[in-house]
């Protein structure tokens, strides 16, 4: 059984003064993590990357939900076709008047996503809310993988959120899964992997979403030489052992994670290899840690994020874990 808001892990934040540098000067200094690029100190190389203040202050700045959409974005006209399915996790028993769910649905409608969403309802695990969060995400991944692996002749009645699963099934190869812990890639034997967007019902918008950002993520995810398991559309930047580095595209950053790099699960895209890895880990070991911590262990060098992130954890919506 589950809960829907596992954005925070019970960890002590990294002191702001800590700086992470590399010889190529591509790693983000944590002391600049909350400073807009145009205000960053000249003490660092011009190659050093700074994340905008809006993108990194999910728990410090309040936004007004659907009204926070970027004025440069025409609501409802964004192209999300690079993701193949969208899941929204919610807990009805913790939302008796459906206020948090309806607020999230309004946000997703404004972003042109609601007609793609499959709502997954779970009861809160009142004995262990962290376990409940973990269970809900694993259940969503199992559901997605089961539908991906359906027979190509399954027909429309077996499709998920439209005909895309039927089209995608022609790419599926049951022998193409990577060995647990092996190198990830966005291609399975040369064929594109399915990409699933997972959301929680305590999200909000950052006001930074434009079509160019979605185009950049789409292009990044499609590159055959790119090795990734997850792309975060929201994450907590001030966690231990996290290094943020730039990629060739300024709208995509790499998240190198160590022990304790629990980035949250408010909004993320995960591919088949990523889902297989987490499901295999679950089947071998069961629940042993919060889902953000398991993700940090499984994907130390194969997680990326949109820059800036389009979603935040809603500051006025209480967590069902912490």
Image: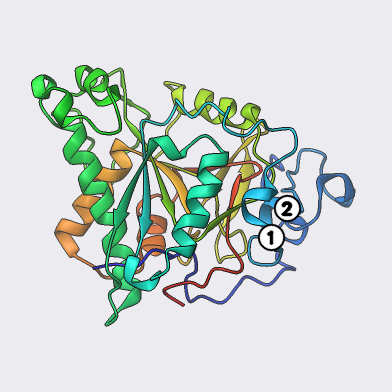
Measured as percent of width and height from the top left, residue 197 is found at 41, 41
Tags 1 and 2 touching, CB below 8 Å: yes
Left or right: residue 251 compared with residue 271: right
| 302 vs 252, nearest the viewer | 252
Which color mode does the image show? rainbow
Q: Which residue lies at the image location 45% right of the left edge and 46% below the top edge?
A: 268
Quadrant occupied by the N terminus? bottom left
Q: Which residue is mark 2?
A: 54
Q: How many marks?
A: 2
Local crowd size for mark 2, using a 10 Å CA cut-off: few (<14), some (14–19), many (≥20): some
Residue 57: numbered disc: 1
Q: Is residue 163 left or right of residue 25?
A: left
Q: In the image shown, does 286 or 115 lie closer to the viewer?
A: 115
Instruction: Examine the rendering and report whether any part of residue 262 can be seen.
Output: no
- Does residue 103 appear anywhere in the picture? yes
Q: Is residue 135 above or below residue 39?
A: below
The residue drawn where x is 15% and y is 57% is 283
């Amino acid at each position: 059984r589950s809960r829907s808001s596992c954005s925070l892990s019970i960890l002590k934040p990294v002191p702001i003064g800590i700086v992470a540098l590399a010889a190529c000067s591509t790693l983000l200094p944590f002391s600049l993590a909350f400073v807009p690029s145009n205000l960053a100190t000249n003490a660092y190389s011009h190659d050093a990357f700074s994340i905008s203040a809006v993108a990194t202050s999910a728990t410090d700045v309040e936004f007004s939900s659907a009204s926070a959409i970027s004025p440069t974005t025409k609501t409802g006209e964004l192209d999300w076709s690079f993701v193949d399915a969208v899941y929204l996790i919610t807990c009805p028993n913790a939302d008796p008047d459906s206020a948090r769910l309806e607020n999230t649905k309004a946000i997703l409608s404004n972003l042109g996503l609601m007609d793609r969403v499959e709502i997954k309802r779970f009861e809160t695990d009142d004995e262990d809310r962290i376990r409940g969060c973990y269970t809900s995400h694993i259940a969503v991944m199992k559901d997605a993988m089961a539908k991906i692996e359906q027979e190509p002749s399954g027909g429309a009645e077996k499709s998920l959120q439209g005909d895309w699963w039927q089209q995608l099934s022609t790419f599926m190869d049951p022998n193409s899964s990577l060995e647990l812990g092996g190198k990830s890639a966005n291609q399975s034997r040369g064929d594109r992997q399915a990409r699933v967007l997972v959301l929680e019902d305590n999200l909000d918008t950052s006001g930074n979403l434009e079509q160019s950002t979605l185009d950049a993520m789409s292009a990044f995810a499609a590159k055959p030489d790119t090795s990734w398991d997850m792309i975060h559309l929201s994450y907590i930047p001030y966690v231990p052992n996290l290094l943020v580095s730039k990629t060739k595209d300024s709208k995509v950053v790499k998240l190198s994670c160590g022990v304790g790099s629990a980035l949250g699960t408010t909004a993320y895209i995960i591919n088949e290899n990523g889902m297989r890895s987490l499901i295999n880990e679950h089947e071998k070991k069961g629940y042993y840690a919060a889902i953000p911590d398991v993700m940090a262990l499984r994907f130390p060098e194969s997680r990326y994020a949109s820059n800036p992130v389009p979603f935040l954890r809603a500051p006025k919506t209480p967590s069902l874990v912490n």
